[in-house]
Amino acid sequence: MLRRSKLKVFALLPALTLAVAAAGCGSETTPAGGQTGGADAPALIKSGKLVTCTGLPYEPFQFEKDGKVIGFDVELVDLVAKKLNVTQEIVDTPFDGIQSGVDLDSGKCDLAAAGMTITDTRKQNFDFSDPYFEATQALVAKKSAGVTDFDKLKGKKLGVQNGTTGMEYAAKNAPGVELVTFEDLGLLLTAVETGTVDAAINDNGVLFDWIKKKPDFEVGKEFDTGEQYGIGVKKGNAALLKVINETLAAAKSSGDYDKIYEKWFGKKPTK
Ligand code: ARG
């Protein structure tokens, strides 16, 4: 709906990277310069940086606080940057350009980490890492409105986020419901809060996080969409994909993944 032109670059403080790395001591590490100097080292678009495309805000996966971008995805990608002996730099850009593969193709970033669901359509346009998080679509609305499922929204307005799996799911499964598209999650949730829309659909993780601070709102139906998040790289960038997958696997076995998960979700992962 509202299209604000946004291309904001955040350089992450090395301290953040170091804090995470220190937490993982004992896990597999790469000697300084090891990855960057190796024969099959991934080529990065900006020397010394691992540039990440993401769509803000998407709390707790990626959001801005005190001028810095923090969150679950940010910390996972910090581990990848650490492994490559570089620092992560984050580019905030509309999610639709991320999920279509356009941003990766045009060299805007090395990878995309945006709470992004692995889908067959997206897989045709770019390559995904191994899955790192499970999600499902859900509805959020004011408690007093009682619009906890699609049938209660007939003739009413449902907010969707542009380019997302939630938007696609609602378009297929909510006949008679008027869909209103928003560019990012922040605008979508503001519309729910102000009553511009009767409800919104998005991933369960971000909605449960939001209602913690909004006691008048509730998460209604969770649709069993069985989604998994993956990190995207430009099609054919096998060298970077390999480092990402190795880093995710190492983080899972070292316990780093669980620590980061608990930090952002307040509980241990269920598997
Ligand atoms: N998981 C959903 C999808 O892949 C929504 C992701 C939105 N992410 C964001 N950073 N805005 O479509």
Image (tube, grey):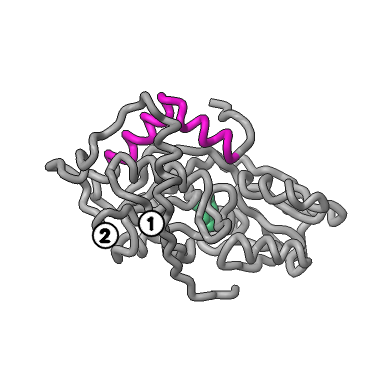
Residue bounds of the magenta highlight: 242-264
Outermost residue, front direction?
A: 15
At label 2, the amino acid type is Lys
At label 1, the amino acid type is Glu
Q: From the viewer's side, name the closer residue of 210 and 103.
A: 210
Residue 167 placement, left or right of 112? right
**Could you say which quadrant of the image residue 185 lies in?**
bottom right
Q: Earlier in the sequence, mark 2 or mark 1?
A: 2
Give the prevailing secondary structure in the magenta stretch. Answer: helix
Give me the residue at 52% from left, 42% from top: 227
Label 2, secondary structure: give it.
Answer: loop
| Disc marking residue 267 | none
Q: Is residue 256 magenta?
A: yes
| Disc marking residue 46 | 2
Residue under circle 1? 89
**Does the beta carbon of the residue at mark 2 sit less than 8 Å from ligand 1?**
no
Q: Is residue 114 magenta?
A: no
